[in-house]
Image (tube, helix red, strand yellow):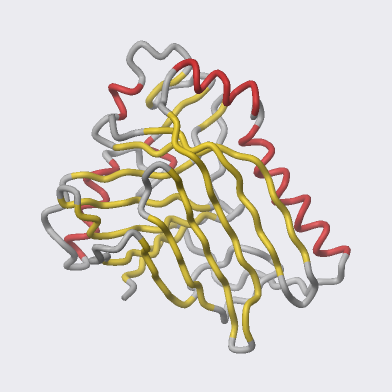
């Protein structure tokens, strides 16, 4: 079984115009999209496209039309003329808990056999909008480095004219996703998601529920609470000028 749970934390540190930081314990699912139906067999608390304590819905990702996510990924890789031999797609994301989820960042890892050939960073904001940054990836190293300009409105307290540096380790026994957001004067913010791999099982999911019973609601509540803290600290509000629904961009 390639799918697993990553049990760990998410942290953010803002460096300017004021120092601000947060850290929350979380867990994520790392799902081989070919295994999703098998993951729900003999697991009474996890379902695919159906309500449960934990569930995974196709409609939460990709084109958000409920259709096959692997086909959506492969179609876009073909559109952008990236490796045509992708045979495995794995998705890092939060599950729905009692029917609700908010995924600020989901990551599709696309493999040709054992070789990682592309990564899609799927970013959402609280306005139900989404942008996916598509990167071809051809490195034998365990370390993955990507860089691109920000193309999508995420935070009302962050300017658009910035760029991202992504620093990832290929998922294995540990998960490590590090993102640095900068402008021409230097680092504005860093974000980190880290975790240790454990098996997806009814027992482990139940333990996650006991530890994080309302994680989905905690995430969206924390986003608004931290935004309020930034407002109290006097950070400039940046309005949303362009409204989108679901965009993709190819990056180098």
Q: Which residue is pictured at 31% across the width and 29% down the height?
A: 36
Residue 80: percent from the left, percent from the top? 22, 67
Nearer to me, 80 or 208: 208
Q: Is residue 23 above or below residue 27?
A: below
Q: Nearer the viewer, residue 66 or 140?
A: 140
> Position of 58 compared to 180: left or right?
left
Relative to 178, say whether 86 is above or below.
Answer: above
Judged left or right of residue 132, residue 77 is left
- How many tags in the picture? 0
Q: Hey, which quadrant is residue 247 in on the image?
A: bottom left
Question: Dividing the picture into quarters, in which one does residue 71 lie?
Answer: top left
At horizontal 46% and vertical 67% (from top left) the residue drawn is: 166
Residue farthest left in this picture = 85
- Say which quarter of the image contains residue 84: bottom left
Residue 126 locus on image (x, y percent) = 61, 52
Residue found 27% across the figure and 30% down from its top: 35
For residue 131, side relative to residue 62 (left or right): right
In front of the other: 44 or 57:
44
Residue at the spot 65% in from the left edge and 64% down from the top edge = 155
Front in this rendered view, residue 72 or 65? 72
State left or right for residue 30 relative to residue 94: left
Where is 106 relative to 27, above or below? below
Residue 168, above or below 93: below
Quadrant of the frame with the C terminus: bottom left
The quadrant the N terminus occupies is top left
What percent of the width, then of the height, locates residue 162? 56, 79
Q: Position of residue 243 (x, y in %)?
A: 54, 65
């Amino acid at each position: 079984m390639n799918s697993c749970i990553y049990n760990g934390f998410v942290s953010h540190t803002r460096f300017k115009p004021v120092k601000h930081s947060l850290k929350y314990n979380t867990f994520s699912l790392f799902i081989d999209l070919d295994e999703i139906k098998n993951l729900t067999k003999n697991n009474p608390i996890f379902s695919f496209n159906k309500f449960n304590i934990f569930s995974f819905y196709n409609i939460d990702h990709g084109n958000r039309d409920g259709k096959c996510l692997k086909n959506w990924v492969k179609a876009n890789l073909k559109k952008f003329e990236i490796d045509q031999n992708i045979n495995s797609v794995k998705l890092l994301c939060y599950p729905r808990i009692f029917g609700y989820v908010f995924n600020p960042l989901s990551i599709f890892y696309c493999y040709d056999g054992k070789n990682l050939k592309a990564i899609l960073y799927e970013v959402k904001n609280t306005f139900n909008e989404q942008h996916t940054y598509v990167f071809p990836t051809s490195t034998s190293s365990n370390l993955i480095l990507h860089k691109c300009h920000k193309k999508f409105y995420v935070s009302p307290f962050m300017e658009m004219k910035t760029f991202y540096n992504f620093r990832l380790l290929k998922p294995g026994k540990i998960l490590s996703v590090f993102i640095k957001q900068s402008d021409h004067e230097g680092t504005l913010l860093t974000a980190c998601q880290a975790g240790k791999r454990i098996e997806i099982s009814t027992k482990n999911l139940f333990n996650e529920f006991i530890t994080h019973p309302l994680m989905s609601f905690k995430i969206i509540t924390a986003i608004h609470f931290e935004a309020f803290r930034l407002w109290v600290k006097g950070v400039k509000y940046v309005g949303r000028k362009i409204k989108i629904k679901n965009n993709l961009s190819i990056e180098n």
